[in-house]
């Protein structure tokens, strides 16, 4: 791997993340790499500056934070094919990251990258666009219509500061109406996102090595409303049914992307670009990650498997 230009994003407000970023920057600069560092968080977005300053010629992105910081990096860098090394410095769950303990020797990490002793894991992403069914609506509103990218999930649900709004939505797949949902909203997730908001909404866990789309209702007002998993190349359309509710939003990875008004719909499909993650560990296990991150306890009484060869 040739590393000429690198960016380092650390979690906003994390002193340990900032210290790691400064250390990594010094080490990379000693190797002749041009480096830019910056904080990333709810109120900080370094990527427009990164991309403008580097002329979009970035060879490596180091993300020092949790899953939120990693998701933000993927939304900006996937379309450029930039590999992301994510280290859980100052984060919490860290499903998408290496642990801070296994990355303590950063000098060795740069040596491994330069000598191609690593793997690249590519993960599916979703893309959403707002479609104006009322042709003149978009011109009057002047709102962004996309495309919007996500690594975890697209979510269509209301955001109101003064009341809990029930969303009335119609789900359409490849032009065919599937069902209508009344509740808190709908989640359209990738396999990566199936262990995030989707699993919290009692949706399915989908292996991250698959390409599929999981659609999960959030707190539906009908017991017949269930999650569904569909092939990745189908287009999912979500229509707001209310004619006077202006609180509906499109959320990408937990961040508000834009509003959805009556007379519009959201079209969601698999993106042509994929997030690329650098994998350093040689013994990574998806199932071990599920057990550790989701705290799976299994049966209360553990039985030895006497038929398994030792």
Image (cartoon, helix red, strand yellow):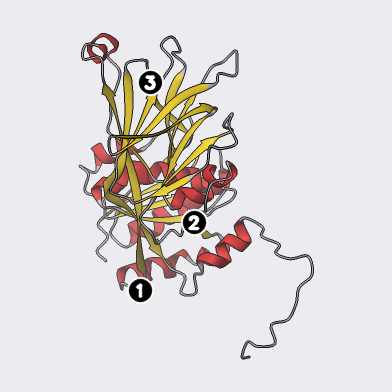
Towards the viewer: 148 or 58? 148
Discs 3, 2 touching: Cβ within 8 Å: no
Examine the image and state in which quarter residue 279 appears: bottom left
Is residue 200 something one can see in this rendering?
Answer: yes
Of the numbered discs in the image, which one, if any, rests on residue 260? 3
Of the numbered discs in the image, which one, if any, rests on residue 117? 1
- Marks 3/2: CA distance? 33 Å
Discs 1, 3 touching: Cβ within 8 Å: no
Q: Which quarter of the figure is the N terminus placed in?
A: bottom left
Residue 220 versus residue 9 in the image, above or below: above
Q: Which quarter of the figure is the C terminus placed in?
A: bottom right
Horizontal side of 155 relative to 14 (left or right) equals left
Give SS at disc 1: loop
Residue denoted by label 2: 97
Task: Judge depth for marks 2 and 1 and give the one in front.
Answer: 2
Examine the image and state in which quarter residue 292 appears: bottom right
Residue at x 57%, y 67% (from the top left corner): 288
The mark nearer the N terminus, 3 or 2, is: 2
- Marks 2/1: CA distance? 18 Å
Towards the viewer: 43 or 159? 159
Horizontal side of 221 relative to 270 (left or right) equals right
Towards the viewer: 274 or 226? 226
Q: How many labels does the image show?
A: 3
The mark nearer the N terminus, 1 or 3, is: 1
Is residue 37 something one can see in this rendering?
Answer: no
Task: Judge depth for marks 3 and 2 and give the one in front.
Answer: 3
Task: Judge depth for marks 1 and 3 and give the one in front.
Answer: 3
């Amino acid at each position: 791997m040739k590393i000429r230009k690198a960016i380092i994003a650390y979690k906003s407000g994390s002193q340990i993340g900032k210290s790691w970023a400064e250390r990594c920057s010094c080490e990379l600069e000693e190797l002749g790499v041009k480096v830019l560092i910056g904080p990333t968080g709810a109120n900080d977005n370094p990527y427009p500056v990164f991309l403008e300053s580097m002329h979009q010629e970035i060879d490596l992105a180091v993300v020092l934070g949790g899953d939120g910081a990693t998701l933000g990096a993927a939304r900006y860098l996937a379309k450029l094919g930039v590999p992301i090394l994510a280290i859980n410095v100052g984060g919490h769950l860290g499903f998408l990251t290496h642990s801070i303990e296994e990355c303590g020797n950063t000098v060795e990490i740069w040596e491994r990258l330069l000598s191609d002793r690593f793997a690249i894991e590519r993960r599916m992403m979703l893309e959403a666009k707002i479609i104006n069914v009322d042709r003149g609506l978009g011109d009057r509103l002047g709102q962004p219509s996309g495309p919007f990218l996500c690594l975890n999930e697209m979510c269509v649900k209301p955001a109101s500061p003064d009341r809990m709004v029930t969303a009335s939505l119609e789900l359409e797949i490849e032009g065919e109406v599937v069902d209508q949902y009344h509740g808190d909203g709908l989640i359209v997730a990738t396999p990566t996102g199936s262990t995030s908001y989707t699993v919290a909404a009692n949706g399915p866990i989908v292996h991250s090595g698959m390409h599929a789309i999981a659609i999960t209702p959030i707190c539906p007002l009908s017991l017949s409303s269930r999650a569904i998993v569909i092939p990745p190349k189908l287009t999912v359309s979500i229509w707001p049914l209310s004619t006077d509710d202006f609180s509906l939003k499109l959320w990408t990875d937990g961040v508000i992307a834009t509003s959805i008004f009556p007379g519009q719909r959201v079209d969601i499909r698999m993106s042509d670009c994929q997030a690329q993650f650098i994998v350093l560990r040689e013994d990574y296990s998806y199932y071990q990650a599920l057990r550790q991150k989701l705290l799976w306890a299994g049966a209360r009484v553990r039985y030895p498997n006497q038929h398994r060869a030792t």
